[in-house]
Image: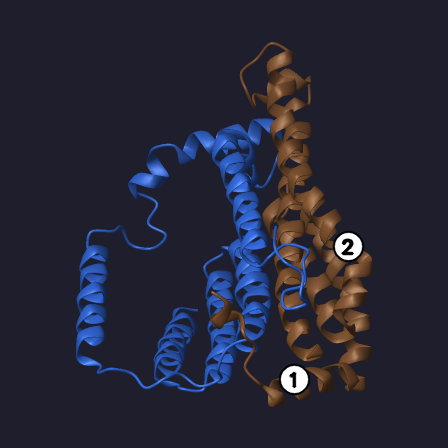
Chain colours: A blue, B brown
């Protein structure tokens, strides 16, 4: 299984580099979908099936459609870039800092990791008491009900923002003046 | 602002979109797949207590199904299923449904969103209702955003 994870990670990295290199934005948008699909596969292997669902539906499906919709309004090719040294430096620094940060993190799946010793046992016990087999649902909807309410409000706010930006039910360019 | 919104001629993309609607295999296959996607979304929604998933996942899967329908068979068909106005109302309904569970538990004498107030199986019922709220809000938000983008697109194609 770890060989498969490694393969997926390599493909992810390759796809990411290809997206950065491509100047054809249509191809880049399609590769972004490939990236999402690979990520969804990786999440499935890591037993985070619900995250994989979301990635497959949002990352692969909806986002790509929105990208293509946006592309139809803009140009298909990326404009000439202004040099690569500064962006590369930023990427290397950020990536290096992130990789350095992971050295402090517990090994993947380590049962002795603090997160599994602190609150997780109580969550599992609580879910067991309620006879709800999916602990994630219990944590999200019950233990952290406030968080999830907040997240739902975030989705609401995002939708309101986009509808206001894109002009609501009005057809843009049909000669209807905005109020 | 108006400069960015001025459509660039993208005839290749436009004909690609038209071609998408005329592809027989795509049309037939999406007609077959869309009901399964919607059914799967409902399964993920109401089976979220037992299997992986929940409101958010169900919402995005449902939205993806509707968007696929709109992509292949035309936005008007998708808009006939759920119009902008209905989608906008449903986003708010989802959030309010979630919030009202909290109000109900307060009225019944416990803390906000303390599902124990709802009765013996309060935790079960509370979770199902709030997940339904999340699902409705997420699905309709996604569909509404898609319709907004599709509108921009169509304006260009009509010109």
Q: Quadrant of the N terminus of chain A?
A: bottom left
Residue in the picture at 35% in, 84% down: A21
What chain does badge 1 belong to? B
Mark closer to the chain start, 2 or 1: 1
Residue in the picture at 37% in, 52% down: A109
Taking depth in this image into account, of B8 and B98 the one nearest to the observer is B8
> Would residue B32 be found to the left or right of residue A142 on screen?
right
| Residue B47 seen from this side | no
Which picture quadrant has residue B71? Answer: bottom right
| Residue B77 seen from this side | yes
> Would residue A172 be found to the left or right of residue B29 on screen?
left
Taking depth in this image into account, of A3 and A162 the one nearest to the observer is A162
Residue in the picture at 72% in, 87% down: B19
Q: Sort mark 2 into few (<14), some (14-19) or many (20+) by Cα contacts within 10 Å.
A: some
User: Which residue position holds label 1?
Assistant: B14
Taking depth in this image into account, of A150 and A7 the one nearest to the observer is A150
What chain does badge 2 belong to? B
Vertical placement of B107 versus B39: above or below? above
Taking depth in this image into account, of A31 and A129 the one nearest to the observer is A31
User: Which residue position holds label 2?
Assistant: B82
In the image, are marks 2 and 1 on the same chain?
Answer: yes
| Rendering coords of residue A160 (x, y %) | 57, 47
Q: Are marks 2 and 1 in contact (CB under 8 Å)?
A: no
Q: Sort mark 1 into few (<14), some (14-19) or many (20+) by Cα contacts within 10 Å.
A: some
Which picture quadrant has residue B27? Answer: bottom right
| Rendering coords of residue B97 (x, y %) | 67, 32
Q: Secondary structure at mark 1?
A: helix
Q: Secondary structure at mark 2?
A: loop
């Amino acid at each position: 299984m770890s060989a498969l994870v490694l393969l997926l990670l390599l493909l992810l990295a390759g796809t990411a580099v290809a997206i950065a290199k491509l100047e054809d934005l249509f191809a880049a948008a399609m590769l972004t979908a490939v990236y999402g699909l690979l990520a969804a596969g990786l999440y499935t292997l890591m037993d985070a099936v619900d995250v994989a669902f979301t990635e497959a539906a949002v990352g692969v499906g909806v986002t790509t459609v929105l990208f293509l919709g946006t592309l139809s309004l803009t140009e298909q090719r990326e404009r000439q870039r202004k040099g690569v040294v500064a962006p590369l430096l930023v990427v290397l620094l950020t990536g290096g800092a992130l990789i350095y940060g992971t050295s402090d993190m517990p090994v993947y799946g380590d049962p002795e990791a603090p997160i599994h010793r602190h609150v997780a046992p109580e969550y599992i016990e609580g879910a067991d008491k309620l006879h709800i087999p999916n602990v994630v649902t219990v944590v999200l909807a019950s233990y952290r009900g406030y968080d999830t309410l907040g997240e739902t409000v975030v989705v609401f706010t995002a939708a309101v923002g986009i509808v206001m930006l894109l002009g609501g039910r009005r057809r843009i360019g049909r000669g209807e003046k905005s109020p | 602002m108006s400069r960015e919104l001025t459509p660039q001629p993208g005839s290749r993309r436009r004909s690609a979109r038209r071609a998408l609607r005329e592809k027989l295999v795509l049309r037939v296959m999406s007609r077959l797949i869309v009901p399964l996607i919607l059914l799967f979304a409902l399964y993920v929604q109401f089976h979220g207590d037992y299997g992986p998933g929940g409101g958010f996942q169900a919402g995005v899967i449902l939205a993806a199904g509707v968007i696929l329908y709109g992509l292949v068979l035309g936005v008007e068909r998708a808009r006939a299923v759920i119009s902008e106005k209905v989608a906008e109302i449903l986003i708010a309904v989802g959030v309010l449904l979630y919030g009202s569970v909290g109000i109900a538990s307060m009225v019944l004498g416990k803390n906000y969103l303390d599902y124990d107030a709802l009765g013996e199986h309060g935790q079960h019922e509370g979770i199902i209702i709030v997940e339904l709220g999340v699902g409705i809000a997420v699905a309709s938000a996604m569909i509404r955003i898609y319709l907004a983008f599709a509108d921009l697109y169509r304006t260009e194609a009509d010109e």
